[in-house]
Image (cartoon, rainbow, N blue to C red):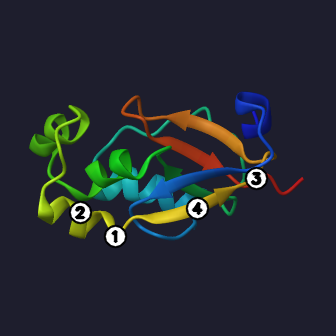
Amino acid sequence: MTLGELIGKKKLEAFNSHGHWSTLRGIRKLEKEERENIFPTLIKYPDDTPAIWVCLSARKALRYLEAADQWDRLTSGSPLTREDKETIRDISQVELLPSDIVACTDFDDGYLILRNRR
């Protein structure tokens, strides 16, 4: 499904805690080898497809820079601490295109986006 189909907008701004696009190969390696996460095997795109994990809000992306035990605090709507506000400056805004593909979600408000090169 493309982002345009999902949200019906021409442009969408999303947020990423790492600040750059990678490849599907790079993200698969990061998830499986470094983070020891399960990575979906149903994604049938070339390994060199540009890919990026995003959230739809900077506050949600902030969680990926914090320890897991801080996630509840960050998603509860509690005011951000001074340290949170300083850290949130490290979150990068990413412009997504309507033709970009939503490959999967991590079910924590993160979406793996692939750049459609067709």
Instruction: Name the N-terminal-most of marks 3 and 1.
Output: 1
| Residue 85 circle label | 2
Q: Is residue 81 above or below residue 86?
A: above
Q: Is residue 30 visible?
A: yes
Residue placed under numbered mark 3 in the picture: 97
Residue placed under numbered mark 4 in the picture: 94
Amino acid residing under circle 2: Lys
- The answer to whether marks 1 and 2 mark residues whose Cβ atoms lie closer than 8 Å is yes
Mark 1 and mark 4: span between their CA atoms? 14 Å
Q: Position of residue 110 (x, y in %)?
A: 44, 40
Q: Nearer the viewer, residue 5 or 8?
A: 8
Amino acid residing under circle 1: Arg
Neighbour tally class for label 3: few under 14, some 14-19, many 20 plus, Cα within 10 Å: some
Question: Could you tell whether 14 is left or right of 59 in the image?
Answer: right
Q: Nearer the viewer, mark 3 or mark 1?
A: 1
Q: Position of residue 49 (x, y in %)?
A: 70, 59
Amino acid residing under circle 3: Leu
Neighbour tally class for label 4: few under 14, some 14-19, many 20 plus, Cα within 10 Å: some
For the N terminus, the quadrant is top right
Helix, strand or loop at mark 3? loop
Helix, strand or loop at mark 1? loop
Q: Position of residue 77 (x, y in %)?
A: 23, 34
- The answer to whether marks 2 and 3 mark residues whose Cβ atoms lie closer than 8 Å is no
Q: Residue at x 71, y 42 (%)?
A: 101
Amino acid residing under circle 4: Val
- The answer to whether marks 2 and 4 mark residues whose Cβ atoms lie closer than 8 Å is no
Q: Position of residue 112 (x, y in %)?
A: 55, 45
Q: Residue at x 34, y 71 (%)?
A: 90
